[in-house]
Amino acid sequence: MINIHQLTMPIFLAPMAGGFNTPELVAAVANAGGVGGFGFAYSSPEAIDHALGTAAALTEGPVNANFFVFPEVSAPQPERLEAALQALNALSVDKHWDESALTQPYAPDLSRQLEPVWQQRPAILTFHFGIPPMVFIEKAHALGISVGITATCVAEAQAIKTAGADFIVAQGWEAGGHRGRFQETSVDEELTLLLLVKALVEHVSLPIVAAGGLMTGGDIAAVLSAGATAAQLGTAFLCCSEANTSASHRALLLSKEPREAVFTSAFSGRPARGIQNRFIDAMRDKELLEFPLQNTLTGALRQWAVQQENAEYQSVWAGTRYRGIRPLAAAGLMQALTDELNAAQD
Ligand SMILES: Cc1cc2nc3c(=O)[nH]c(=O)nc-3n(C[C@H](O)[C@H](O)[C@H](O)COP(=O)(O)O)c2cc1C
């Protein structure tokens, strides 16, 4: 089993659902001594199989396959659906959503998604939004696959340790994309990454992979000296040439406009951090379907916006420090991070 204390470079490419992480990006990070990662949350078993196989042909380095632990979800209540549709109908764009997409199964079947993982055995398997059924953790261990789970607070990290995972992905408040809290209904402690890492070092004896707002080797050095074993970067890789980030998403990430990266549930039904745009503003305080039904409902709108190169109606996920993005090839970014980390540690 991989020992994450012994990586050549203590850097994980954050798994990013939505197809951002191409096999080429994953392989480039792994070939530079880090850990490549795929966000397979919404992917079909066939797509997962293909992506893992393609990456394996490009690298012998470690790869992480990441999944969401979806809640039990059933058909939306008619009144709630009506209100959610009304909120979308009030937008000043043509109707690009389709409630007929809301059919069973309402969330992907994790058991089926994991079949190609058991076949192809990437080095690492991680989960977001909670602890998966124990049988998956046991099966991963039986196959020599290391398991990590996202925590945003000490209580979640303690539950991860009890479940027998091998490491914790500590997700700070600064992080781009979905906030991986187990329960949306509990109070969010909103811990920034350094506070979270320090609290986990004190209270939970598992290796920590720190994620959220890390853009430079100096940032990585800071979380390592706080006690993390490795750092996980998402936003920093979104403008790499190998990333499958839409042109308009890239343009907004690199623009000089003073826009904040804010939390919104409007795209998916759960809080995720992305650059503020017209959709987020228009949907504030509006009725939404629960996660992931809202994600299904807004899927066609988001796709239309990508095709139109209209970033105002896309989920432009980004962490708070997105202005530090460097649009380089992944090997160049890994080299810059390595040089900065070495300089900070001298
Ligand atoms: C575009 C995007 C998609 C993401 N998708 C996932 C995902 O599928 N699974 C996951 O565990 N984390 C996901 N995250 C969160 C990352 O794992 C990580 O917490 C975050 O990128 C760290 O903050 P940073 O973006 O400031 O580096 C995503 C983040 C971004 C930016």
Image: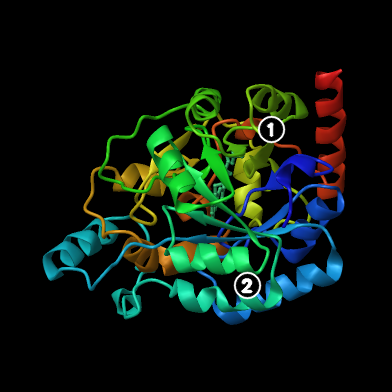
Marks 1 and 2 close (CB-CB < 8 Å): no
Image quadrant containing the N terminus = bottom right
Q: 129 or 328: which is nearer to us?
A: 129
**Mark 1 beta carbon near ligand 1 (under 8 Å):** yes
Task: Judge depth for marks 1 and 2 and give the one in front.
Answer: 2
Q: What residue would you read off at disc 1?
A: 215
Q: Which residue does the image show at 39% across and 45% down from the upper left?
A: 181
Residue 250 vertical position relative to residue 107 in the rendered view, above or below: above
Kind of residue at disc 2: Val
Marks 1 and 2 sit apart, C-alpha to C-alpha, by 30 Å
Q: Which residue does the image show at 14% across and 70% down from the upper left?
A: 78
Residue 265's label in the rendered image is: none
Tell me which label, 1 or 2, sits earlier in the chain.
Answer: 2
Image-quadrant location for residue 87: bottom left
Kind of residue at disc 1: Met
Task: Report the number of discs.
Answer: 2
Q: Residue lying furthest top in this view?
A: 346
Q: Position of residue 276 (x, y in %)?
A: 45, 39
Q: Residue lying furthest left in this view?
A: 79
Q: Which residue does the image show at 73% across and 48% down from the upper left?
A: 3
Image coloring type: rainbow
Image-quadrant location for residue 281: top left
Q: 344 or 104: which is nearer to us?
A: 344
Q: Which residue does the image show at 66% across and 41% down from the upper left?
A: 233
Q: Position of residue 344 (x, y in %)?
A: 81, 20
Image-quadrant location for residue 213: top right
Q: What residue would you read off at disc 2?
A: 117
